[in-house]
Image (spheres, grey):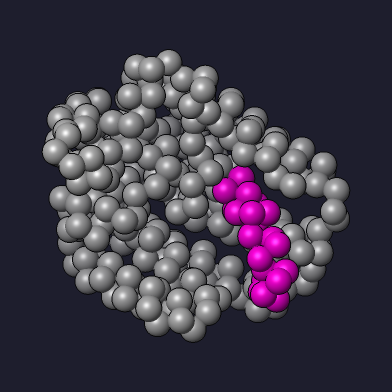
Amino acid sequence: MYGYIKPLKAELKVKHWELYQAAYCGLCHRLKERYGFAGRFCVNYDLTFLTMLYASVIPNSAPNAERLRCPANGRKKAHCFAGAASDTAADLTLILAIEKLRDGLRDDSLPKRLFADFPALAILRSKTKRLPKIHEKFTLSAKKALDELTILEQNSNSGGSQLDRAADTFAGLLSAAADYAESEENRRILANLLYHIGRVIYICDAADDLDEDRRRGTYNPLIAYPEDKTALKRSLEHSAGIAAADFELLPESEFTPILQNILYLGIPQQITDIS
């Protein structure tokens, strides 16, 4: 997706950093196993975060590290976390990558559409026949949310309310990933947690793209937002705080220290970096 939900590495113990790498590499490996080599290009930090969250709420998800060869490291083998959590996260990674490419076709330049977006979308769409039918609901939710975002962009009214509506739509997309939790209670907690994480992702991404969107004249809900981002950061800090509080209600797993680092240190750092 976007890559904002990641740990603050300097504050992680070495063993926890290695476990995080195993989760990331495991997601990459499962993408390759399930969708071919092209699937590896979809791996990202945000869905690695989801993999680790799933480890405590999806059955058969206890960390199970395997040493598998990594094409990025030549002959070296990497520790890879394998389990139901990484399989589910890999499936959702493919769905979101396809929908993000489909959405990007509306905004990207013609050369990028012709030589990058179209070929990549064609390749990834060819893999959707391998998706389990259990993901049909999530796929429809992702398409609906991104289509709603497109309508908002086409009928944009500058200001804070526009930002809130767009962020809410994207956050709803991510909260749909909570449906895979085993119990109703965990689904409810996870949905609220992912909603606020989605809100942070959307606004951080808008802030990063702001200068380029101004230059290109493309839609960005922050264009008419006040230059002083203090209120915006406070709003994001509030969302990050809710997500962290919800996380503490979920069962613990071996990934808990890493997830705490992300929620209490990594995400606040991303918010601080908004200019």
Residue situated furthest front in the rendering: 74
In the shown orientation, is residue 132 left or right of residue 265? Answer: left
The residue depicted at 24 percent of the width and 66 percent of the height is 128
The residue depicted at 71 percent of the width and 56 percent of the height is 164
Foreground: 57 or 43?
43
Foreground: 162 or 69?
69
Would you place residue 91 above or below residue 190 in this image? below
Magenta segment includes 201: yes
Would you place residue 80 above or below residue 171 in this image? above
In the shown orientation, is residue 130 left or right of residue 89? Answer: left
Magenta segment includes 141: no
In x, y percent, where is residue 211?
Answer: 70, 62
The residue depicted at 85 percent of the width and 55 percent of the height is 226
For the stretch drawn in magenta, what is the main secondary structure? helix
The residue depicted at 20 percent of the width and 46 percent of the height is 71
Give, as a single range, the part of the protein colored magenta.
200-219
In x, y percent, where is residue 57?
Answer: 35, 31
In x, y percent, where is residue 32?
Answer: 20, 52
Q: Quadrant of the N terminus?
A: bottom left
Would you place residue 261 above or below residue 176 in this image? above
Q: Is residue 203 visible?
A: yes
